[in-house]
Amino acid sequence: MSTLSHIANTVAQQAGEALTADEQKSIAGASGAGMAYGLGAIGPGIGIGYLVGQAVQAMARQPESAGQVQTTMFLGIAFTEALALIGFVVFILLKFV
Amino acid sequence: MSTTPVNPLTTSIEGPAPAMEIAVDMAKRAKWLVPLAAVVGGFWGVEGIASAGYAVVVVVVNFLLAAWLLATTGRISFALMAGAALFGYLLRLGLIFGAVMLVRNASWVEMVPLGIMLIVTHLGLLFWELKYVSGSFAYPGLKPKPVSATSDVDHAAAEAA
């Protein structure tokens, strides 16, 4: 976040103009929002990959229980995805409110 | 113990698609969240109610799309289903992002109730559905016994017969 602000400051200084406090706040808000969304999406991505991998393995081992495994898998995916959704909501609240 | 190797590229799921049934079930239950959306959005006026309702629609469409992707690709192969789960996750996050960005400057949109209802609807519908799914998994064990006016002696006699 501070790196992005530093880059923006450097670019502005080279262009011969200083960033105002509002502009700096806006840059910090935007980069913070982007990090909240981006980092918030990594964990669920790993979780969904692991979850589906294990579910596929379970269905391959016991095809007769595929229905139960699919049900659990779908709910697990949706619950894991809730974390990413929370990251997204933090993003829109930081960026647009 | 020997096991037959299964090729995930060629093995597919046969039979009913429970994911789609669950998603349709959740879509039906979403109508009970409309009053909640009205209450939450009501703090921000008419715009808040419209935004909260929009969030409910976005979440329901997201669930239906996820279930459709899993059900459709599961009928082709396990490997494709795994790919659809992961890339579908990215796709659906992108679609939610696009759906919110599309309306963010509209006059009827308030971001705070939209964000709150996105999370509340998503988790609310999931926990609600989880209750029914848990009950159906434990069906024989948790099945309530029929209540009758007969005495314990009658029950014992019936069981003995």
Image (tube, grey):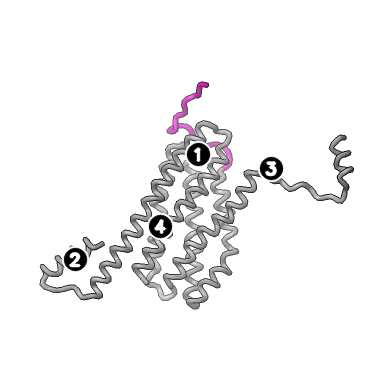
Q: How many marks?
A: 4
Quarter of the image that includes the C terminus of chain B? top right
**Residue identifier under label 4:** B95
> Could you tell which of marks 4 and 1 lies nearer the N-terminus?
1
Q: Tell me the magenta residue range.
A: B1-16
- Residue at image position (51%, 35%) is A58
> Could you tell which of marks 4 and 3 lies nearer the N-terminus?
4
Q: Are marks 4 and 1 in contact (CB under 8 Å)?
A: no
Residue extending farthest to the bottom is: B45
Of the pair B58 and A85, the residue shown nearer to us: A85
* Residue B26 falls inside the magenta stretch: no
Residue B89 disc label: none
**Residue identifier under label 3:** B141
Amino acid type of the residue that numbered disc 2 sits on in the rendered structure: Ala
Residue B75 disc label: 1
- Residue at image position (47%, 37%) is A56
Q: Quadrant of residue B85?
A: top left
Do the residues marked 2 and 3 share a common chain? Answer: no
Q: Are marks 2 and 4 in contact (CB under 8 Å)?
A: no
C-alpha gap between disc 2 and disc 4: 30 Å
